[in-house]
Amino acid sequence: MRMLCSVCSKQTTRAYCSNCSNTSPSLLLKWRMALLSIHEQNRKLQGRVKAILERSMGQNDVDMDGDKNEENDFPLLKSKLRKVTILKMKKRNNRIRFRIEQLKKNMENKKQRATHMEDELQLEIPKEAAIILQDDEDLMERIHQTQKIVQMAQQEKLHSLRKWFMVRQRKDLYLVSFSILFQPIISLQNVPNLPRSVTISSLNNMFQYLDIFAQIINFKLPYDGFHSLTSAKEDGDDNNTDVVEWITKLTIGLLQLASKLQLIRTKSIDIHWLLDQYDVDKLFYSVVQQRQIQCRVISSGQCWTFSHVYAMVSEILNISERNSRNNLRADSTQRHSIKTADTQVAHLDRWFIVG
């Protein structure tokens, strides 16, 4: 059907209504059916190609219906796909290998640059750096000289302190090996034989000496025995003073000073053996004279705690007191001219006076 234009009076192409276009067998319906058929064929072919690829790649082992040519093409396609996979892997490996080579070159360049900079630093030291090094050396030399001067001054003061307190070693008196200010330096062996007043006075002098000694070498003693004993004497509490406690504090202070002065090489020592060999008086004299103290090292080591040292001092004092009583009984049987024990003690108490 052709239409005539009312303006130009010319014929135009045919025009159909939508119903005719959709339903007429000679118009669009024929082409629609052909398009649907092509879509169905494409879907089937796509599924077949996918199945062939899966079987060629070894992902599907199910047999497919087809002609013999297709069955013969599977190994060839499989080998082709394997070659493609191998080529992709080689390409990826080559890319990684190239990247590794680049990183190695960068590292080598940085290493060479660092070596070159180190050589320049060693060859061309700035003048300011040399001046700083020289200043450091001068400072260390001044510090070393100052330490020597301080040590010499300390030794001179300690020598004057020994002369001031008249710390001496006695070889002419029984049970008195050392003296301080014309009084015996107490030991665990002679404490039971000494009057209590002499023991307290000797402890007071020894603590006073150690207090001044520690101030000279700039050391803090663990116990302040001098002021405590002085206060007890001024208050008249000598009878209430625990001698074992103050001997324990004195022993711990001596051990601390010996460790500070490096007279004791190690802290893992047998303290009971040390007190048995040196006693308190010889240990005090060795620290005063700054002599090396021989120690017996044990694996476990004994801590310098107050309770531990207190127990050992008490044990040694008890043994010494029993021995002293036995000796006193033996002397009393031989001296028939002395009538009472008080007269005997008064007579025997004068051995501690030293000159």
Image (cartoon, rainbow, N blue to C red):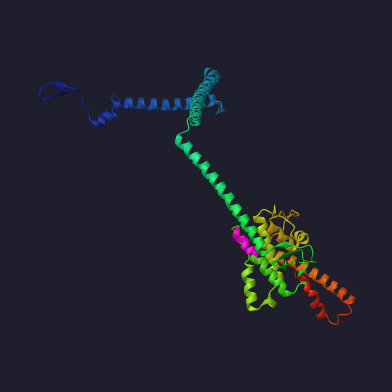
**Residue 13 position by quadrant:** top left
**Viewer-side residue, 20 vs 58:** 58
The residue closer to the viewer here, 250 or 306, is 250
- Which residues lie in the magenta part? 209-216
- The residue lying at 70 percent from left, 77 percent from top is 239
Quadrant placement of the C terminus: bottom right
Q: Is residue 119 above or below residue 252?
A: above
The quarter holding residue 196 reads bottom right
Placement of the N terminus among the 4 image quadrants = top left
Q: Position of residue 33 (x, y in %)?
A: 35, 27
333 up-or-down from 184: above or below: below
Q: Main secondary structure of the magenta part?
A: helix
Q: Residue furthest bottom?
A: 339
334 vs 126, left or right, is: right
Q: Residue at x 63, y 61 (%)?
A: 213
- Along the line of sight, the residue nearer the viewer: 322 or 308: 322
Depth check: give the residue in front, 130 or 315: 130
Q: Position of residue 106 (x, y in %)?
A: 48, 27
Q: Specify whether residue 107 is in view.
A: no
Residue 90, horizontal then vertical, whole percent: 52, 23
Q: Would residue 252 be counted in the magenta stretch?
A: no
Q: Is residue 42 left or right of residue 258?
A: left
Residue 137 is at least partly visible in this image: yes
How many dots with numbers? 0
Residue at 63%, 55% (x, y): give it.
Answer: 155
